[in-house]
Amino acid sequence: MTLRPNPIRLALAALLLAALGGVAWRAATGWAPSRSDYPSQGVVVPAGAHPSWHVLGATGVDFAYIEATLGGRVLPGWAEQSARAAKNGIRHGAIIGYSPCSPASGQAAAFVTSVARAPGLLPPAIRLDWPAGCTARPDRALILSELATLLAQVEGHSGKPALLLVTPAFEQAYAISAAIDRTVWVEGDWLAPDYAARPFVMWTANHARRLRGSDRPLPWVVVQP
């Protein structure tokens, strides 16, 4: 005798799994580390995002980093979003997306010409990774030389030491945090990463946090007290 699946039970099971999946997804996209462990918390605003800054401020965003350049290319929206963040009293800074496929001097020039020197800005952050389409894998000596050039020009313009936002893959390839004495910013969802050679100061803890005031997920960042 062949037992046939009960279609009603199958439908109920499917609904239950979907509901559980929805609950898990809402929990994941709403998660942030405890404020008791990390009192200062903020967001990364990708190029092209247009958040409602007054709403973000009301939902607990203490600071923001806004993507400004990538591989020597000025990204759209930096000036507008910087002005809106300032108008709403949210401390913010610029992210420079480094690319091994472009000369450091050109990448520094893009930052200097698009991000005005302003005492109120947070220190610039240099995100170290391979952008889409960049297949270059220079040796470590060349990367460190290029980063020295980039840091000298970026810091000379901003008047502040830059942060190094080192992705796990880039750190594994070049051990940047062991070679360059700068504040380290790491990435890793849910669990605090330990891939850097020195203790991190900033951590992107949830790349897909949903917030009121934004129509897209925003990476959520915390600061070591």
Image (cartoon, rainbow, N blue to C red):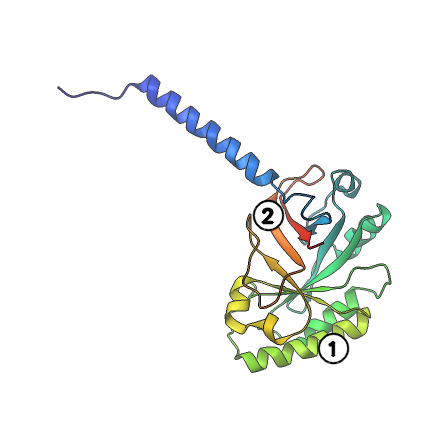
Residue pictured at 67% horizontal, 51% vertical: 222
Badge 2 crowding class, 10 Å Cα cut-off, few under 14, some 14 to 19, many 20 or more, is many
Instruction: Inspect the image, locate mark 2, and give the three-letter code of the amino acid beneath it.
Output: Asn
Residue pictured at 47% horizontal, 33% vertical: 21
- Provide residue 109's location: percent of width, then percent of height: 74, 73
Instruction: Inspect the image, locate mark 1, and give the three-letter code of the amino acid beneath it.
Output: Ala
Q: Which residue is mark 1?
A: 152
Identify the image quadrant of residue 93: bottom right
- Provide residue 13's location: percent of width, then percent of height: 38, 24
* Labels 2 and 1: the sequence-earlier one: 1
Q: Which residue is mark 2?
A: 206
Q: For the residues marked 2 and 1, what is the alpha-carbon distance in whole angstroms?
A: 31 Å
Q: Quadrant of the N terminus?
A: top left
Circle 2 or circle 1, nearest the eye:
2
Which element is circle 1 on? helix
In this rendering, is residue 82 above or below 104? above
**Pick the front one: 140 or 175:** 175
In this rendering, is residue 209 above or below 44? above
Say if residue 45 shows up in the picture.
Answer: no
Badge 1 crowding class, 10 Å Cα cut-off, few under 14, some 14 to 19, many 20 or more, is some
